[in-house]
Every structure is written in structure tokens, then in C-alpha cells.
Amino acid sequence: MTHPDEELAGFPVRVEIPVQWGEMDAYDHVNNVVFFRYFESARVEYLERCGFNDSYREQRVGAILHSTSCRFRRALVYPDRVTVGARVTEMEEDRFSMEYRAVSHEQEEVAAEGEGVVVSFDYEAGDKTPIPEAVRSGVRELETGDRRRRNE
Amino acid sequence: MTHPDEELAGFPVRVEIPVQWGEMDAYDHVNNVVFFRYFESARVEYLERCGFNDSYREQRVGAILHSTSCRFRRALVYPDRVTVGARVTEMEEDRFSMEYRAVSHEQEEVAAEGEGVVVSFDYEAGDKTPIPEAVRSGVRELETGDRRRRNE
Amino acid sequence: MTHPDEELAGFPVRVEIPVQWGEMDAYDHVNNVVFFRYFESARVEYLERCGFNDSYREQRVGAILHSTSCRFRRALVYPDRVTVGARVTEMEEDRFSMEYRAVSHEQEEVAAEGEGVVVSFDYEAGDKTPIPEAVRSGVRELETGDRRRRNE
Amino acid sequence: MTHPDEELAGFPVRVEIPVQWGEMDAYDHVNNVVFFRYFESARVEYLERCGFNDSYREQRVGAILHSTSCRFRRALVYPDRVTVGARVTEMEEDRFSMEYRAVSHEQEEVAAEGEGVVVSFDYEAGDKTPIPEAVRSGVRELETGDRRRRNE
């Protein structure tokens, strides 16, 4: 049993979300679908901080979700809070791979882990396009900054 | 016990929706929030058919939800289907009042009834505005057509 | 413009919820349905604190939602946080009336106000029943405690 | 462009779901999270038909979702309907692997494909357990019956 932050070492972006009672289903735990909402919230925060949302607002080159997955590790029940981490694990020319991790505050354990592939998309041209340079730097900064913090 | 259509006499617009298992909450019945999604689906279909969506696409004068309510009558459980009716009960210069009714196919009874007030909104000007004439006619036609059908 | 707590004077129970990006709909603001989830979260916290959840666990006498409504005042957009207050405004033998209020932190204004009627229900007998005495005291304590705090 | 049923050859279980307007997000297409709700609805229907729900009701041995994923192929917009297929592709002692496929009626194309691993769980013992024999037969019957139909 550890503090959420320990479970999330290496995840530069984190959002904290209270579990809502109505997110539980007839099995009395948080429904599987809700974890993808949690991951999305961490992803959106990451896209904001690495500059992908700016890129979309300025040049219509934004991120599009190609695929995503979740491995459920522990049932989550209300009341609880989760901290959800997001990080980029691999960057290619027109896409990057992300990892998500949701940690339960009550259980002090990982509730779920996931992955996602985000593609750089030119909404004007309607086609994928290389990741803008500013976004590449943004990602590198987030990921290295975090590595630096971990080494301190 | 009656056929859904009998419970919905007087509702010119109806949508049929399968209850999804994941819409049930920890009390093992469809969560209260979901009924507002059902009502919304019937409202959107009504707005399409009375011409309010055209009006939004053509002149940026669309509908905005001012308020809504629901009276829960019977617990809904999966598997089931609901038919949800929508009608306009009163039309003022810049708004109209709607009624919604969700009928369970399994129970052949009304599961919930609701109301909503929809305001005519000029999205360019950012303010409410009189209901476009084409929409007023559309509403009258839907409501009278239905009355006519009932009298046949 | 005021601090959320000022807008919520008189509401003894409050929950704070981050707006999630995915709660916005095609109109680029938080979907109407989501406000009922917010209200539910405040209601569940109230039911916990007034003893209704204990009563359900111990004697199967719990709360059931009879009806609810929402008046939308301001569009809510991500990123934002809401504080949602709940209070009981009237208590009858077998039910009480609640008010909900959701305040936007970004706008420092009320985003939505709602009401709900909660009925005391004997889940063994399958019928409504007087509100348990412990719950009545719990409600009175919450509501008076809050009044006292306001007068200090 | 093909009929949904052609795209779903080999999927013995299919559910048809109307896309609801409120399932679209600020990008004006159905939010990624909603696809997992669609997959869940097909999975629940499969679990019903292969006997896993009976097994849960009778001996408390039911299915638990271990992991799931989705590959988004085409943006889905309201109005539309999806037919979602589910099939079992591999059965081990205590789990089986499923595939899901959601076909858009408007586009007559696959909107999304997914996978899931379902584990057999003894809810009394709180641990995984071999898949009950009746469920194994149920799965085989569904999958072979479908193969037979395809060969006719």
C-alpha cells in the first residue's frame, strides 16, 4: 500500500477525480465504461499541456484517438477518489502511444491501467499529418521534466 | 396494461430506445439521470421535425433548454425497451413548453413523465429571440396532425 | 461575482466536482443530463450525512427519488470545477423536498439550480414509510447547524 | 458498402442500438467512451445467451471483465443506428476472449472493433474458477450454430 503519487512516478500529468455514486452499475462497482472517461480526462489534460490543443486552435492540427484499452485490476466503489496519470511512451512521426493509470485513494492501489494511440490529424485536410514540432517539444519537456524530478 | 402507443396518444413524436444493461445503477434499476437522456432523444427528434434544427443550420436561431423535470413512476430494469413521446403543450413568443413520457414495453406502463421549457435563441446575437415562423408552423402541424389522427 | 461558498450559504452539504471534458456535448458545453449526475452526487452525500444510508443498511428503510428538476442558468464549459450544494427545504411524514445548486468556479456564478423530492421507502415491504426518527434528527441537525454557522 | 449483416458474418450475437444525439461530444461525433457501452450491451446479450447469467443466478459463478479495447475506424454521428456483434474467439479453462464489431447503418461500414477478455468468477469464493460446463456448451453452440448458418 502506497500513496497515489508513488504509484504514479513517471506519469508527468495527473488529474484527481472523485468517484461519483452514479458511476457504479448493478454489480455495485464503478462500471468499466467510466474508466475510459477517467483516462480521457487525463489525456485531455496531457494534450492541453503538451500544446496539442493550442495547435488545434491555431492551425487545426489536433489529436484524434485511434485506439484505447483498459486492464481492470481492482473494483472501485463509491466513496473514493482516483488520481489518473497519463504519459507518452513512444512517439512516431504522426502518432504517439500513451499509458494511463488510475490509482484508488481508498485502496492505495492501482485500479486500472490503460493504453491509447493518439494520431496527429489535420482537420482542414481531413487526413493525418506529422506531429507539429511545438507539440513534439511539449511532449519531450513533459516527459523529461518528469524524469528529472524523479532523479532528484 | 396497454400497448405503448395507447399510453402515448397525443404525443406526435416518439422514439424507441432499448434499455442498456449499463444504464442500471447500484439499486439495480435504470439510474434517474438516464431518463433525461431518453427525454433529450425525444426532444431532439421533435426539434428536427418541427424545423428548429433547420432554423439553426440556416439562420443560427436554435433551441436552448431552459429547464426540465422528471417524475419517476416505475423502476425500469434491463432487459426492456422504452418508447418516449414528446409534445408541445404551450407556445409563447420566444419559448415553448414540452411534455415527455417514457413507456416501458415490458411493463406496458408509464415509467416516467417529464416537462421541459425550450427557448428560441439567436446564437449570433447571443440572446433569446421570437420563435421563427417556420418553426411555429412546424409545431402546429405536428400537434394538429396528431390531434387529427386521434379523431379519426 | 462571488466565491462559491457565498453562493451556497444555507446549503449544509457541498461536494466539489471537476468538470470533465467528455461531459460536453456537440454544443460545446456541459450536457443537461450531467447536471442531474452532479445533483445526485450532492444528494447521495446528504443522504449519507443525515443517516438515511445507515437506515437503509440497518433496517432496509432508504430513500427513493420521486421527482427532480433543473433550471439551467449558465452554460458550463471545460475546464472548470463546480461546487454543488444540497439542502432540505421541507420535511413531511414520508418525504422531504431538497434544493440543489451548482456553482461554477470559473464564472463564480450559479450554473444551475434544481429540486428533488425524496421518499422514505421500506425496501422489505415494498412501500413508502415514515422517515425514520434518526434521519429526521439528522436532517434537522444539518439544517440548523448550518443556520447557526450562518448567524455567527 | 454493405448491409450490416454482411459485416457481421461470424458474429452469432448482435444487438441494434440507435445512436443518441447526447452521445456526441464537443467534436460533434460519438464520444469514444460510448463505444464501450455499445460493446458492453453486446457482451451482456452474449452472456445471457451462452448461459453465464443463469450460472450467476443459480451458483454465483458469473463473468467478470478482465480487460477490453477498441480500435476506432470511423466517426459516428447522430442520426444513425449501430448493429453491434459479439463472438468468442478463444476459450481457456477460466476465461474466454471476445471480439466486438459496431457497424454504422448510415455509412454501411465498420465504425469500431474491439476485444475483451471475460473471466469466470466465483462470487461466493471471491476468486476465478473454471468456466461452468453449461456455459462452455452454450458458447460452442452459439459459435458453431453461427458457423453452420454461414455455410448454408
Image (spheres, coloured by chain):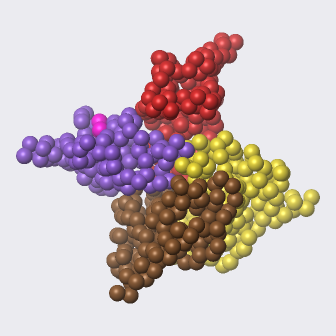
Chain colours: A red, B brown, C yellow, D purple
Query: Against B66, is D63 above or below?
Result: above
What kind of secondary structure does the magenta stretch mostly adopt?
strand
Task: Where is residue A32? Give x, y as percent.
Answer: 45, 43
Q: Residue furthest bottom?
A: B151
Q: Considering depth in this image, is D20 or A90 the residue closer to the camera?
A: D20
Horizontal side of D54 relative to B74 (left or right) equals left
Q: Which residues are magenta?
A: D97-101
Task: Where is residue B139? Give x, y as percent.
Answer: 50, 72
Q: Residue furthest left?
A: D152
Horizontal side of B15 relative to A105 (left or right) equals left
Numbered disc total: 0
Task: Tell me if I can see residue D16 in this picture.
Answer: yes
Query: Against A18, is B130 above or below?
Result: below
**In the picture, residue D92 is in which quadrant?**
top left
Task: Tell me if I can see residue B72 in this picture.
Answer: no
Task: Where is residue D51? Give x, y as percent.
Answer: 25, 51
**Residue at left offset 48%, top offset 67%:** B50
**Residue at left offset 38%, top offset 38%:** D74
Check residue D62 for magenta coloring.
Answer: no
**Residue at left offset 54%, top offset 37%:** A40
**Residue at left offset 63%, top offset 60%:** B121
**In the picture, residue A58 is in which quadrant?**
top right
Task: Where is residue C87? Give x, y as percent.
Answer: 73, 64
Q: Considering depth in this image, is B78 or D13 the residue closer to the camera?
A: D13
**Which quadrant holds the N terminus of chain B?**
bottom left
**Which quadrant holds the C terminus of chain B?**
bottom left
Q: Considering depth in this image, is D73 or B47 the residue closer to the camera?
A: B47
